[in-house]
Image (cartoon, rainbow, N blue to C red):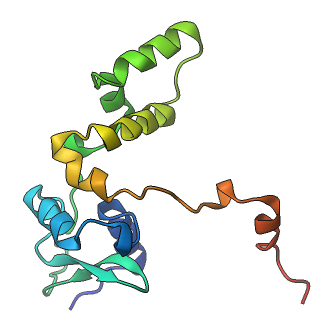
Amino acid sequence: RSQMPRLRLLALASLLAPCPADELPPAEAIEAWAHEQGLLSRSLRLSDSTETGVGVVAAADIPAGALLVRSPAPLCVTAARARADPGVGPLLLRAEATGPAVDDNVAMAAFLMRAVDVPPPELAPWIRALPASFDLPLTWSEPELLQLQASPA
């Protein structure tokens, strides 16, 4: 089988199923949605692992140059999409009317927060697969961050 660099597989896995397997709707549901939307080649499938979470594995031989992943614009979460959303757009406009321009990342975050409660139908399976919480160094306490410091040894 042709090998795809591991980093690209990890990026693909995070795009399609960005959370641990125990927090995810069945991988089969996400995989079926990704295949129906034309996002994921039929040569790939999602795989659940209790050790590593959800990943992408080759389900068949992959010829050189094969298109494995597609990200069509209508399925992308963009600042423009957030600003055009009937639930988020007016809030962003109101915020900008009384203060500085809303950053594009903030607009997309607002869209995603609303999408958890009111998912756009075309994104619903992906939205349901998003994790409810994150464990990121950005949110760690000072003692936790100190554990990342290099040892003097």
Residue 94 shows up from this direction: yes
Give above or below for 6 relative to 141: below
- Pinpoint residue 144: horizontal percent, then vertical percent: 76, 67
Q: Residue at x 44, y 20 (%)?
A: 92
Residue projecting furthest to the left: 36
The answer to which quarter of the image holds residue 48 is bottom left
- Pinpoint residue 21: horizontal percent, then vertical percent: 35, 74
Residue 67 shows up from this direction: no
Give above or below for 63 relative to 15: below
The answer to which quarter of the image holds residue 141 is bottom right
- 11 relative to 65 in the view: left or right: right
The answer to which quarter of the image holds residue 120 is top left
- Pinpoint residue 119: horizontal percent, then vertical percent: 25, 41
Q: Residue at x 41, y 39 (%)?
A: 113
- 109 relative to 140 in the view: left or right: left
Give above or below for 48 relative to 19: below
The image quadrant where one finds the N terminus is bottom left
